[in-house]
Amino acid sequence: MCLPATDTDEDKAGYVQTIALVTVDRTVEYREGDEAPGGALLSKVTVVETLKSNPPATLSIGQSVLRQTSGGYAKTKPAYLPLEPGHRYVVGTVPDPAYGDGWVWFATAADNDLTTATSRWTRAVDRQIAPHPDPACNDVINDSTSPATP
């Protein structure tokens, strides 16, 4: 099944419900996946700045990660950094009650330059594109339960 296009920042901003600059407080747990390699990392974060939507001051969010033999976690996609306690990220989330306040659709580092990180995503929110099928897709199914459904 094809998912909506989320190649650009503007696509991502249109797809997610919430975008926020967050500080990761702690890792809550790791849930091993059933079928594919990796699993879900659940993190507790504090919202430093809201860029889209109106999230609560703290969030519990899940994300897909690959567990490393060293005990750390690796990203499963290029713009999908594993959330590490003590660091800041701009995250975009979609609703998913199985993981508390949502599922991380993207995470980008914000430790080194908060102004650049927040400007990038503020611009993306201002120019966000409504969810639309990936143009390479030829088996689009309309699913009214998807957060991508307008």
Image: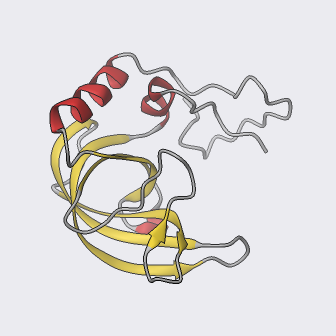
- Looking at the figure, which quarter contains the N terminus? top right
Task: Say which quarter of the image contains residue 127.
Answer: top left
Residue 101: x %, y % from top left = 35, 60
Residue pictured at 49% horizontal, 20% vertical? 129
Left or right, residue 104 beside residue 101: right
Q: Is residue 21 above or below residue 81?
A: above
Q: Is residue 122 above or below residue 127?
A: below
Report the number of numbered marks: 0
Residue pictured at 30% horizontal, 27% vertical? 120
Residue 63: x %, y % from top left = 47, 62
Residue pictured at 85% horizontal, 29% vertical? 138
Residue pictured at 78% horizontal, 37% vertical? 141
Q: Residue furthest front?
A: 70
Residue 144: x %, y % from top left = 64, 40
| Most foreground residue, 16 or 112 | 112
Task: Say which quarter of the image contains residue 137.
Answer: top right
Left or right, residue 119 beside residue 41: left
Q: Is residue 60 above or below residue 108?
A: below
- Looking at the figure, which quarter contains the C terminus? top right
Left or right, residue 121 beside residue 99: left
